[in-house]
């Protein structure tokens, strides 16, 4: 069985990697075409678009894993059925579950990998991608952007980068201010350790001011204290919650706990916290559904089997979206709303597996 398991694993992984690469390339190409006008309009360098797509890649890879897994299983078993390999294994007394076990185990490992990437890579990368979109391209619906370790804020003719903002004391720490002309060219830059709100203006302490001179050069000055009358008041920098995809499971859990302790409704964050646990298991569940679909397909029916599998995947994602909406609206408990689709389709997969001819 060891040799057979290696053979199944190798054939599955070859198809999985190939399909993941093809789907990722298509996705990035479409995103490139859709985003091109925005980058051209912002007069952004081509390297910035490459970086933007690069930071989007981990999330896209995670989102494509379920469909790549499902189609890989269907194609692999349909090819084996066509070559009479499945018939040969059954004639040797191997049940469908037994020769499918390596694929099921691989799907579990893939799910673990998806969870780890979603926890360790995606929050940082998608935060960087959103930073480029909202700040560098000026496309944010909000003037503020709150990244992994700093705050960006787009003001009137200026952009703020703040390492930390103390809303109670109304103090900015480790800040950089960029001032722009009408063509969005930098005309002045201020780096400072601290900015304090005095009631009607900002007191900027211990920093450097860099300005463009009339001859096109730069004039650098050090200062201990300067006062700036800026249109932005302290409430403009109050930290707002990041998007769920910008937070890991543990970050969401801590944030939901803090929201509850402050007396606010944390349902939205609790639901998304559970979804982050439920989503990686999609691959395992779809494998349980894909195996019976493929083994029940007659020779020449591969396109139909793939179509049916994609439809199942589509309905799964729709079900997850609907149950999540029920959770957000309070119609279902957060845990049930995130896991109900998994439970329904898992039972459906088990039912199909039990009906497979051995």
Image (tube, rainbow, N blue to C red):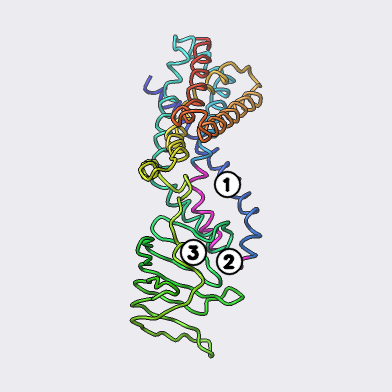
Residue 211 image position (x, y, % from top left): 47, 83
Residue 154 image position (x, y, % from top left): 52, 65
Give the quadrant of residue 280: top left
Q: Nearer the viewer, residue 327 or 107?
A: 327
In this rendering, position of residue 207 left or right of residue 185: left
Asked if the residues shown at circle 1 and circle 2 are in contact, with their CB atoms under 8 angstroms apart, the answer is no
Tag of residue 333: none
Measured along the vertical axis of the image, is residue 296 above or below residue 53? above
| Quarter of the picture holding the N terminus | top left
Q: Give the tally of numbered discs.
A: 3
Looking at the image, which residue is at 61% across and 76% down? 182
Residue 107 image position (x, y, % from top left): 44, 29
- Residue bearing mark 1: 25
- Magenta-drawn segment: 42-61
* Secondary structure found at label 2: loop
Residue 111 image position (x, y, % from top left): 43, 33
Tag of residue 153: 3
Judge the density around disc 1: few (<14), some (14-19), many (≥20) Cα neighbours within 10 Å. Answer: few
Please name the predominant secondary structure of the magenta segment in the image. helix
N-terminal label among 1 and 3: 1
* Secondary structure found at label 3: strand
């Amino acid at each position: 069985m060891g040799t057979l398991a290696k053979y199944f694993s190798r054939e599955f992984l070859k198809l999985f990697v190939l399909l993941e690469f093809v789907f990722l390339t298509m996705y990035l190409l479409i995103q490139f075409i859709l985003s091109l006008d925005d980058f051209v309009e912002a007069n952004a360098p081509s390297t910035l678009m490459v970086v933007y797509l690069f930071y989007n890649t981990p999330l896209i890879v995670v989102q494509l894993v379920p469909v790549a897994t499902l189609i890989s299983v269907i194609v692999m078993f349909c090819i084996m059925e066509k070559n009479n390999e499945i018939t040969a294994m059954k004639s040797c007394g191997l049940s469908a579950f037994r020769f499918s076990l390596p694929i099921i185990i691989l799907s579990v490992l893939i799910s673990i990998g998806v969870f780890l990437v979603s926890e360790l890579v995606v929050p940082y990368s998608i935060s960087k991608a959103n930073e480029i979109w909202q700040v560098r391209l000026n496309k944010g619906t909000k003037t503020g952007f709150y990244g992994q370790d700093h705050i960006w804020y787009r003001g009137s003719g200026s952009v703020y980068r703040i390492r930390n903002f103390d809303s109670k004391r109304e103090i900015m720490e480790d800040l950089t201010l960029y001032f722009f002309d009408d063509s969005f060219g930098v005309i002045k830059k201020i780096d400072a350790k601290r900015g304090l709100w005095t009631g009607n203006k900002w007191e900027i302490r211990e920093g450097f001011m860099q300005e463009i001179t009339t001859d096109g050069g730069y004039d650098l000055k050090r200062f201990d204290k300067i006062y700036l009358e800026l249109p932005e008041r302290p409430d403009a920098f109050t930290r707002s919650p990041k998007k769920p995809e910008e937070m890991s499971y543990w970050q969401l859990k801590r944030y939901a706990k803090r929201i509850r302790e402050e007396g606010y409704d944390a349902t939205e964050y609790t639901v998304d916290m559970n979804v982050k646990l439920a989503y990686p298991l999609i691959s395992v569940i779809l494998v349980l559904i894909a195996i019976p679909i493929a083994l029940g397909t007659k020779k020449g029916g591969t396109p139909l089997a793939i179509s049916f599998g994609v439809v199942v995947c589509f309905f799964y994602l729709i079900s997850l979206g609907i149950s999540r909406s029920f959770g957000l609206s309070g119609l279902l408990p957060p845990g049930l709303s995130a896991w109900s689709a998994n439970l329904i389709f898992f039972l459906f997969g088990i039912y199909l597996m039990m009906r497979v001819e051995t």
